[in-house]
Image (cartoon, coloured by chain):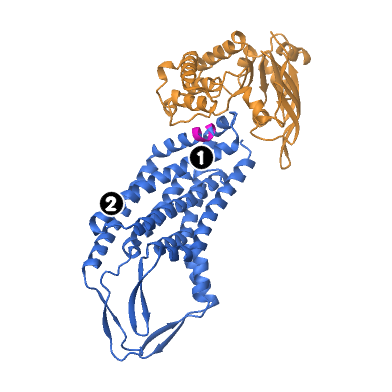
Chain colours: A orange, B blue
Amino acid sequence: MYMEPVIEVKGLTKKYGNTVAVDHVSYTINGGEVFGLLGPNGCGKTTTILMLMGLISPNEGTAVVNGSDIKEDPMGARRQVGLLCDNVGLYENLTARQNLRFFAELSDLKPREAEERITKLLTLVGLKEKQDVKVSAMSRGMRQRLGIAQSLIRDPRILVFDEPTLGIDPEGTRELRGLIKLLAREQGRTIVFTSHLLAEVNRLCDRVAIMKDGKVIAIGSIPDLRKQINAAEGDEFEDVFLRYQGVV
Amino acid sequence: MAGIFTVAKKELLDIFSERKFLLIFGTLLIVVLVSTFQGALSYSNSQSSTGTITIGGQGSNNTAPRQVFIGGAESLSNALSSMVTNFSLVGGVLALAISYDTVNGERISGSLKTLLSYPIYRDKVIYGKYLGGLAAVTAVTSVTFLAGMGIFIGFSGLTPSADTVTRLTIFFLVSLVYMAIFLAVGLLLSIAMPQPSTSLLASMIVWLASIRLIPNLGYAIAQVISPVRMAFRDGGPSFTTGAGFDTVRSIITALSPSSAYEQIVNSMLTTNRMQFSSGQVSVVSVGLNQALASNATLLIYLAGLMVAVFAAAYVLFMRQEIR
């Protein structure tokens, strides 16, 4: 299933004054992989994602996204990736379809092609019946699903989801999990996501990177990570994660 | 260009669908139409009456006061001065209200991150946003002007000559530049300030500075440099100003976009003025070229200010990190 590396992060560093938000982070993500970026708030997960998207510039290091260097060809890198940001980032005053239509126009899709794709995506995320509802009237779970549809409008092979399960009830989380599985397992897309819901990470991710204070302190598949710290068979992934963080 | 127009179209539709826009646009339309109606009646009366002014008399070289006929001497600038003032007040507020949260509003909602995650150059986003705002103020100014001029021509009995139409067109264009300046100020503040509430407050301070603070400062500084002196002569008070007073005051006052705008427009609409010479008063016409030449510096200043403020907003936006 896994192919060549599609994202190569090489010594990525971001400083704000004296604070080092991301400290020489390096890892590789393979095609078709579901890769989890874990860590407590403020550990540098979102900053890493924003650097990958070219929204903030790294002080040191770089990353290559499907052959495009984020420093030399940020536009090329962006073309490869669909982003769902932590607060969804949709236009509240527009309906679901209007939001997707705007992003389709930005992606230079022809009107007919755009309408067809929008209908397909709204069906995929289960929002076809709500296509004329304004985002301001949608629940958090519906917004997240619409956000995923937005990230898919250009049909990118790489998807980056920042906290997709934030503030969603268990039912919504389950729906999202199903959606992510579908996108990764059936459609073969590479998915990078951050989450605090470790049970979800455990269920979904092929590999994870655990971050602490801007650094990647561990990386690998979940069985590998358990092995590295000699976790007991009955230990939850949450216990494993907290041990890496030095909390227990 | 596709990205610019996509962003501009969305910006324009957003502006038109906002209640704050409709509220301020309604206010602008009402105050401008009421003041234009009053101006039209005043213009109509001045054309039909035999107005006189008194010249000479006490304190002058003439021995006896005389009545001089000035019927029909009312200039467009007098008739429309109230409209110009109201437009400068409410038009500035409208332009700021449109733009004060253009960028920081999107930054807070997170949509700016989504927007910039698309393969669209940042400069297209800022151009698109400004273009959308410009389209909105052009629509507002056009509607206000068409309605205002309709009322003015209908009630004043003015038959517009080619000269009048040219003057009104310049009035319209200068008004657009004026609105574009405040639009750029709002945009700049929305980029520089993290919260819309802060940029709204800063916008209001800029507006107050333009309509009140800078003109008052101009007067105060001119007073310090070249004080106005009062003396009692021939039984009444007499004020004398130093040579530099008017120059200093007019230079500082003209730094305010509102004052510069009013000065330009009033000058453009002044079709004739009274001239006093050797105890004689006469009405002389003011040519359009003459008006343009005398306001060239201010016109360049307003256009330059618009470009400079937008350039500052552009540079700041291009360098800003979106977190």
Above or below B86: residue B141: above
Give coordinates of residue B79: x percent, y percent.
Answer: 31, 63
Q: Which amino acid, by three-letter code, is at mark 2?
A: Gly
Residue B66 among magenta residues: no
Above or below A212: residue B227: below
Secondary structure at badge 1 equals helix
Q: Which residue is mark 1?
A: B129
Give coordinates of residue B31: x percent, y percent.
Answer: 32, 54
Residue B4 among magenta residues: yes
Question: Which region of the structure is painted magenta?
Answer: B2-6
Marked residue chain, label 1:
B
Separation of disc 2 and disc 1 at Cα? 32 Å
Secondary structure at badge 2 equals helix
Q: Which of the two labelled residues, at mark 2 and mark 1, occupies the earlier sequence position?
A: 1
Above or below A189: residue B140: below
For the N terminus of chain B, which image quadrant? Answer: top right
Query: In the rendered view, does A133 fall on the left or right side of B110?
Result: left
From this viewpoint, is residue A35 visible?
Answer: yes
Query: In the rendered view, does A87 fall on the left or right side of A64?
Result: left
Q: Quadrant of residue B321?
A: top right
Q: Nearer the viewer, residue B15 or A223?
A: B15
Give coordinates of residue B252: x percent, y percent.
Answer: 52, 66
Give coordinates of residue A96: x percent, y percent.
Answer: 45, 23
Q: Which amino acid, by three-letter code, is at mark 1?
A: Lys
From this viewpoint, is residue A161 visible?
Answer: no
Q: Nearer the viewer, residue A221 or B156?
A: B156
Q: Which residue is mark 2?
A: B150
Counting other residues with Cα less than 10 Å from the Cα at mark 2, is it few (<14), some (14-19), or many (20 or more)? some
